[in-house]
Amino acid sequence: MGGLAGLLLAQPRLHGDALAAQARAMGEALRHRGPAENAAWVDAQAGIALAYQRSGVPGQPVPAGQPLQSADRRHVLACDGVLHNHAQLRAALSAVGHRFRGHSDAEVLVAGVAEWGVEETLQRCNGMFAMAVWDRRERCLWLARDQAGAKPLYYGWAGDCLVFGSELKALWRHPRFDNGVDRGALALLLRLGYIPAPHCIHERAFKLAAGSVIRLDSAAVATGAVAHDPSRHPRRWWEPQARMRQVLAEAPFTGSDDEAADALDALLRDAIGLRIAAGGPAGVFLGGGASPALVAALAQARGGAQVRSFSLGFHGAGDGGAQAREMAGRLRMTHTEFGLDGSDALELVPQLPAMFDEPFADVSGIPFAVACRLARQEVGVALSGVGGDELFLGHERYRRALRSWRIARALPLPLRRGLGRLAGAGGQGPASLLARAGARGIGDTYRRQVSHWQDPGAVVRGAREPQTIHHQADPLGLQGDAAAALVLADFMARVPDDLLCGIDRASTAAGLDVRTPLLDWRVAEFAWSLPTHMKIRGGAGGFLPGYLLRRYLPDALVEQAGQGCEVPLGEWLRGDLAQWAADLLAPAALRRDGLLDAARVDAARQAFNRGRRQWQSRLWTVLAFQAWRAHWRASRGD
């Protein structure tokens, strides 16, 4: 784990000590990501500074001090995360003459950049990382993220200064960063429950998208050429849409169920082996479907590391931990389970804005944050099964979307278009039926499935909602492979900016290193190659992980694995969180702020109070923003 931050001045005007002090202050904001060391590297003449917060993982080599210079001193690197295949890259670099002082993957990365350049080095990487590289010869800054987006990276403008960091906290530390709320990004939050890259809650600030790289030339920054919208300049060094199209066209899987299970078993064993060190204790989170259980089974079967399992349930919601306990027993794991109730949620909820930095409305972040804190008492590294449901169509929402699209597709296209215009943006009753029938493609159908507010632009005053992959009629563009289009849409938006964002913030806040073997790019591309009947069969999703899991657990236990434990959000909002929610949703306060339509929010609150369960998720998006805004104001001293 670690954290990076830095700044590039449009006009070099600070001497070295002042520049280093500013960079260290930005890095210090990320202390929870790496408390062991706060270091900075500066080139005052170029107006560039890089800062790094270092932390070590128990049982693994101590990372090299960063920012780290290449042997020829041309490149300077700061990298947050882990390079899982660093041993293979080290061997390749050693073969062409590179020498290494220690065992750090940062040394491998900076040597790779020196040998192959930034973009070719990225193509060779398998890991979870975000990095900044300053090229002293070309006087340019490179920013990059891993394929799936496991590690975050923000960048934007503080006055005329380019600032960047692992979290917004670092950008906030710059004295000239006082950027207001981006209303379009707020509309996306109300629709999706998170803000997808490249958008950010602040104006003139951005998230680098997963699998992307951006080159920021010092001269262009100095002239202001990229000052207005640098989000136009990143490019995908790993493009999921192109890779999925290629896999489906050139290498579709045509084998049997057993052959597919063999292939998944081998890929996952290797992905898990790259992510846990032999000999040291590792954890795995159980619960929520077959994928976490499969990761646990393969981690235990691999041997060489002490694997402990953890699960979390909710008091008053039945014995949700019984399945996890039985699985752990069958797999001969040491198991720990935690319980959570409304009072625990009330204690944690006020901490969420500081933890997540941006408003974040995935309620699963609450139990996961608790689980990370408690698991950290026993292990330093843990594996998560996140991504399995998204790659193998395990969620019910996929099946609902596919059913709706089959019905809509039976209607002639001109009729569908007319129905869509009649439906407008309405979300309930006849308007909802018209909208579903009027879908242009599977993308329109799925957008309705994942939207909390169907017309968030009407709730956020003066907002123009940006177009995302969820606004495309066919995200994949293959005319007919609707199931693959759903996988692509979630892999490009929900996986990096919701699921992995939640994992990163909750785990780093707890000092726990959580890794996601199912999101290894090789596993992802294999899953994309599979026909839909190897993902959905017999009316149920997640077929192949469950089929493989039967090699390690009894059939009855595998059947129960899909029965996840739902967060009792409605119960909390009517109980322990009721007063907290009422204060944040007060109509007078909403009218005074002027960002949200107080009448629409109050109507949603009243509908929820009348027992309409589906409105709780809409209220939670507003609550997430209101709580974040109060935190943002407090951080500025407003």
Image: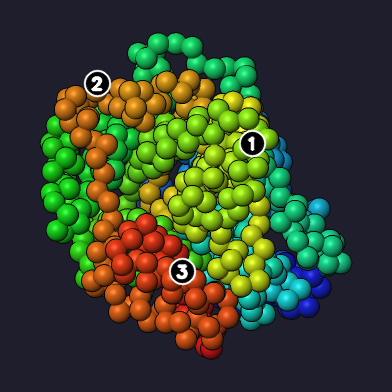
Q: Which residue is mark 2?
A: 551
Secondary structure of the residue carrying numbered label 2: loop
Q: Which is more N-terminal, label 3 or label 1? A: 1
Nearer to the camera, 638 or 563: 563
Determine whether, in the image, residue 379 is placed left or right of residue 168.
left
What is the x, y in percent for residue 534? 41, 21
**Which residue occupies 36% across, 62% down?**
616
Q: Which residue is mark 3?
A: 622
**Which residue occupies 52% across, 22% down?**
529
**Which residue occupies 26% across, 44% down?**
564
Badge 2 crowding class, 10 Å Cα cut-off, few under 14, some 14 to 19, many 20 or more, is few
Residue 331 appears in view? no
Mark 3 belongs to which amino acid? Val
Secondary structure of the residue carrying numbered label 1: helix
> Label 1 to label 3, Cα distance in Å?
36 Å
Nearer to the camera, 316 or 159: 316
Mark 1 belongs to which amino acid? Leu
Residue 60 appears in view? yes
What is the x, y in percent for residue 260? 40, 17
Q: Splitting the image into 4 quarters, where does residue 552 fall?
A: top left
Mark 2 vs 3: CB contact within 8 A: no
Q: Which residue is mark 1?
A: 415
Badge 1 crowding class, 10 Å Cα cut-off, few under 14, some 14 to 19, many 20 or more, is few
Q: Which is more N-terminal, label 2 or label 1? A: 1
Q: Splitting the image into 4 quarters, where does residue 518 fall?
A: top left
Mark 2 belongs to which amino acid? Arg
What is the x, y in percent for residue 41? 64, 65
Q: Quadrant of the N terminus?
A: bottom left
> Label 1 to label 2, Cα distance in Å?
49 Å
Q: Select label 1 or label 3 by which is in front.
A: 1
Q: Is residue 375 above or below residue 82?
A: below
Q: Is residue 149 above or below residue 180?
A: above
